[in-house]
Amino acid sequence: MMKPSMLRSLHSAVSRRSSHLARRGYSSESTPERKVVVLGAAGGIGQPLSLLMKLNPLVTSLSLYDIAGTPGVAADVSHVNTRSEVAGYQGEGELGKALEGADVVIIPAGVPRKPGMTRDDLFNINAGIVKSLCTAISKYCPTALVNMISNPVNSTVPIAAEVFKKAGTYDEKRLFGVTTLDVVRAKTFYAGKANVPVAGVNVPVIGGHAGITILPLFSQATPKANLDHDVIVALTKRTQDGGTEVVEAKAGKGSATLSMAYAGALFADACLKGLNGVPDVVECSFVQSNVTELPFFASKVRLGKNGVEEVLGLGALSDYEKQGLENLKPELLASIEKGIKFANQ
Ligand SMILES: NC(=O)c1ccc[n+]([C@@H]2O[C@H](COP(=O)([O-])OP(=O)(O)OC[C@H]3O[C@@H](n4cnc5c(N)ncnc54)[C@H](O)[C@@H]3O)[C@@H](O)[C@H]2O)c1
Ligand SMILES: O=C(O)C[C@H](O)C(=O)O
């Protein structure tokens, strides 16, 4: 028989734990049912991302779709003893069922780069894939938050917007280009140079997701460090070339998959927390925007119950960053216009 004092301390430990989880948006009593769909779930990103979403206690239903290979991935992931139910769907005939009732749809479907390619070289194949998947989203889950990972993000997000507009389902608050990997890289590289613990580092990354359109704002990085200008220039270039660094190291076997799965899981988790009403969820993302004259732009975004609650301004930029911002605009605009044109052909 447990003594009353022991019962009291057990009870207070449990309530401390539940209020800690509730603050992080994880309380099972207050957490609604959430369905997350991964399109391209059998791929290099899709598989580890599916596992990470299975580990997320905010997810109750995990739907894994691909043109092939999903029964195996779903069977494998479904044995993990966490909250969500897992279902695998394979082939276009099952896409509708995969999407129905989705709260968040994550799209890592499409081909990755090989050495020597730009992300734009993927346009011809991936634009068509994204167009058909977004057509299905507008039909089967028009109110889901869409997390676009497929490259070139600078064009695939505008393609998705046009598809949704044509279907009459476009809500700019619900469409996100996932640029979290740029933030993850900027944080890692900055922590190394500033010699600070990476867990406490924050670096906003604005613009887009390709080469010079990726603009990390190290002048706003925290904790502050007095890094020389040439170090900032090198950090900026390394962040912009982070994807290429991985593509070259993989030598023809694809691009970032594990770090991308991590970044995609972080961003989807932020979307779920926003949907669940957790306050002050802020992440960088490539969204419809009027912070510059470009129609889509990555910056800090506050996430809420309807997706984007507020697109935050850029804050103060250094002269180097101001120049970087002007330099990226023509390329980013051309990629956005290319996507819009493709979707309207
Ligand atoms: N946003 C980012 O930061 C970021 C980072 C890394 C990679 N990416 C991009 O993510 C994409 C996927 O990369 P990967 O390494 O996982 O590639 P991968 O080839 O390993 O996997 C892609 C998966 O997509 C599937 N697929 C193809 N057509 C499909 C369709 N119509 N419907 C559903 N699934 C389909 C394939 O069967 C495959 O399983 C690439 O375009 C890559 O450039 C983006
Ligand atoms: O670099 C790529 O092609 C993949 C991705 O966009 C990345 O940044 O790693």
Image: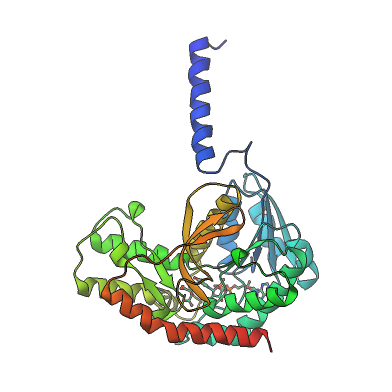
Quarter the N terminus occupies: top right
Residue 122 location, x and y as percent? 56, 84
Question: Relative to residue 200, is residue 339 depicted above or below?
Answer: below
Quarter the C terminus occupies: bottom right
Tell which residue pokes out farthest to the bottom in this image: 345
Q: Going by the image, does 112 lie left or right of 61?
A: left
Residue 322 appears in the figure: yes
> Image quarter for residue 168?
bottom right
Tell which residue pokes out farthest to the right in this image: 93
- Residues 285 and 112: in front is 285
Q: Going by the image, does 65 lie left or right of 239?
A: right
- What residue is shown at x 47% (from left), y 56% (from top)? 282
Residue 114 appears in the figure: no
> Image quarter for residue 82?
top right
- What residue is shown at x 21% (from left), y 75% (from top)? 230
- Residues 106 and 308: in front is 308
- Residues 1 and 313: in front is 313
Looking at the image, how many numbered discs can be counted on the residues? 0
Residue 236 location, x and y as percent? 32, 73
- Residues 13 and 160: in front is 160
Q: Going by the image, does 116 lie left or right of 71?
A: left
| Coloration of the structure image | rainbow
Q: Going by the image, does 31 lie left or right of 15?
A: right
Residue 106 location, x and y as percent? 61, 64
Residue 275 location, x and y as percent? 60, 52
- What residue is shown at x 54% (from left), y 46% (from top)? 278
- What residue is shown at x 59% (from left), y 78% (from top)? 158
